[in-house]
Image: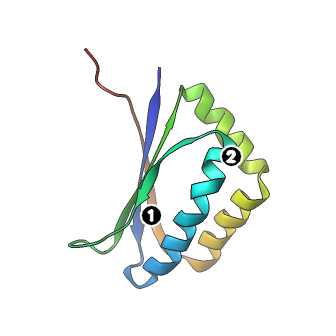
Amino acid sequence: MPVTVFIRYQLDPFKRAQFEEYAKRWLTIIPKCGGDLIGYFMPHEGTNNVAFGLISFESLAAYEAYRARLRQDAEGMANFHFAEESKFILAEERTFLRKVVL
């Protein structure tokens, strides 16, 4: 069953530029590691400290294989370290969604 990972980020509102750089890096890393990236979404109007990422996979097993490849990917690990060092992500929540079909 296909699943979409919905990631909700709580950001430091004064470090949105760093989060945008982080998100831009994932635009090439995620597809390379097997994820179908729907996109990253930044605050525009209203709430200034919440962003979202959506990535689809053929199944939960495909997601797990993607996570294993990501941990072996030098660019992916560098991006994780960038986020940890810069501390622009205050909290991160993942929800696994399935599409409603008839």
The single residue placed furthest to the left in the displayed view is 46
Image quadrant of residue 62?
top right
Residue at image location 34% in from the left, 28% down from the top: 99
Give amino acid for label 1.
Answer: Ala
> Residue 8's mark?
none
Image quadrant of residue 29?
bottom right
Circle 2 SS class: helix
Q: Residues within 10 Å of mark 1 (few under 14, many from 20)?
A: few
- Name the residue beneath numbered marker 1: 91
- Residue 9, given in percent of the width and then of the height, sits at 42, 61
Residue at image location 62% in from the left, 71% down from the top: 84
The single residue placed furthest to the bottom in the displayed view is 14
- Name the residue beneath numbered marker 2: 32
- Color scheme of the displayed model: rainbow
Q: Residues within 10 Å of mark 2 (few under 14, many from 20)?
A: some
Counting residues from the N terminus, which is met first, the one under dot 1 or under dot 2?
2
Give amino acid for label 2.
Answer: Lys
- Residue 57, given in percent of the width and then of the height, sits at 53, 33
Residue at image location 45% in from the left, 52% down from the top: 39
Circle 1 SS class: strand
Residue at image location 65% in from the left, 63% down from the top: 80
- Residue 61, given in percent of the width and then of the height, sits at 61, 26
Image quadrant of residue 43?
bottom left
Between the residue at mark 1 and the residue at mark 2, the CA separation in whole angstroms equals: 25 Å
- Residue 14, given in percent of the width and then of the height, sits at 41, 85
Question: Is 28 on the left-hand or right-hand side of 19?
Answer: right
Question: Is 4 on the left-hand or right-hand side of 57?
Answer: left
Quadrant showing the C terminus:
top left
